[in-house]
Amino acid sequence: MSKFPCLVCLILREELFKPGQSGPFQPCSIEQVLQTIQCAREAGSAEEKEAILSGESLRDVDNVFRIVECADPHVAVSFDCLHANQEGMFGDHLFVELKVVINSIGRAAVVKVEQAFSAMPRWQGLYHFDNVFEMKFNDRSKEDDISKILVFASHGVLTEQDNCAGYLLLRCIRAYVMFDLYIALEVQTSNTITSGQEALTSLSVLLNNHTRTHVFDDILAKGATHVYNTKPNKKMHGPLKQSYQQQTNFKNVVEQILHVDHDQLSSQYIRCKIEEHADYVRLTCGDPNDPSNDSDDNDLNVAPPEEDLYIMVGSRQRPKSFEVIEMTHSNNPVFERFRIKINNFLNYTHVGRVLLDQQGVRNIQLNANDQVIEYHYLKVNYESMVDWCEHTDHLCCSPSFHGTPRYDYVIIKTENGHIFGWLLFIFKCLAIKKTALALVHPYDAPNGARSRKDKHLDFF
């Protein structure tokens, strides 16, 4: 290892492994390198020249970047989240060490952790794992999802009392996840950078990571890390591998793969033109398969109701009465006096009164025979608090989704702030059929003082 191993700053090798290094550090620059080399070339002897160069870990070699304008390699080098974090610190170190610790406990511990992974609720954009200890990854990008679940799946096995080293490793992983969360944000503000720097400080207390001290300098100078992250390119490995294995003769493959790429891009272009034409026909002439378009009185400029712009229900079931629903769920205390709870919600809460006012109804009295339509699917368009853009979430609330029950978890905006909740029942009352309602189990009840483990692992 050289005397100054960092490419960004001039930190001594001896200082590199000291805990709590936070800077500021003297930055490297191409101008400084040129001055040092010029000074060494003017030295009176070879020994003096070598002493000058070795003082900054340099060699007397001309580099093309030294004559190219705005090409300072010390400034250009950037923090890569994939190789430094997901594939580096976590994939090659933290995850490997944790598997060793859990395997040393015994097979029962391994099974318990993998069962916890399998029981993890499904969430759009988060890969669902059934087996993590024996899985092999082509590009290792799924280790990002593993890192987010690992602490929740392992904290029941690695306790502070029974396995102090494993518990400390869990704390390291949790600190790493919080740090990685902040630097991966696609929109950075002064608040997120400050919070990220605090997360880096917490991580530095547990792990030495000098390279990561420069990440927020990169964000301030060059933008969010996704601009210079190599993770998006990893998605190309699959298509390239498939083209190589299935559409080449394994000789002169570059030209053959380029032909495959050209054919695929041409097909995508043709498909886009077909879809654009179909959209144009649908807007100007209507959908020929829709019987409502037989009339010439359709107003194509009429916008859907406001709620339909943000929330849409699907997978409609046959109508049932309140009485039938309560009988069907008689073993579930949540549905006890279900009709009366809905009636009270509509008549006596602010949200319920707003819904009734939108329907032009003053008061409502639901009867046992009133019909209810159940839905098993919910589509929500929302403004993300992460990147301020509109995103779409697809939620299931079904007793049989691909053969197994699936009731998704949600984040709910209430009058008192945001809370977590569990979707139990999505429905429409025919009495107010324009509005969809949801029965949600809220996770907002206080559970007493936070335990020591909750504080260490940042659990709610």
Image (spheres, grey):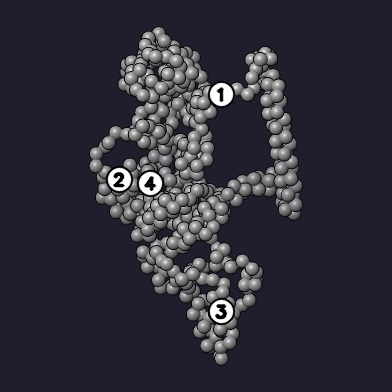
155 or 64, nearer to the observer: 64
Dot 2 surroundings within 10 Å: few (below 14), some, or many (20 or more)?
Answer: few
Q: Picture coordinates of residue 331 (x, y %)?
A: 33, 19
Tell me the distance, in whole angstroms, between the alpha carbons under discs 1 and 3. 68 Å
Dot 1 surroundings within 10 Å: few (below 14), some, or many (20 or more)?
Answer: few
> According to the image, label 1 marks what residue?
304
Q: Which amino acid lies under the numbered mark 3 shown in the image of this protein?
A: Gln
Q: Are marks 1 and 2 in contact (CB under 8 Å)?
A: no
Q: Is residue 245 visible?
A: no
Tell me the distance, in whole angstroms, between the alpha carbons under discs 4 and 1. 44 Å
Nearer the observer, disc 1 or disc 2? 1
Q: Is residue 18 visible?
A: yes
> According to the image, label 3 marks what residue?
35
Q: Picture coordinates of residue 332 (x, y %)?
A: 34, 21
Tell me the distance, in whole angstroms, between the alpha carbons under discs 4 and 3. 50 Å
Secondary structure at badge 1 equals loop
Tell me the distance, in whole angstroms, between the alpha carbons under discs 3 and 2. 53 Å
> According to the image, label 4 marks what residue?
151
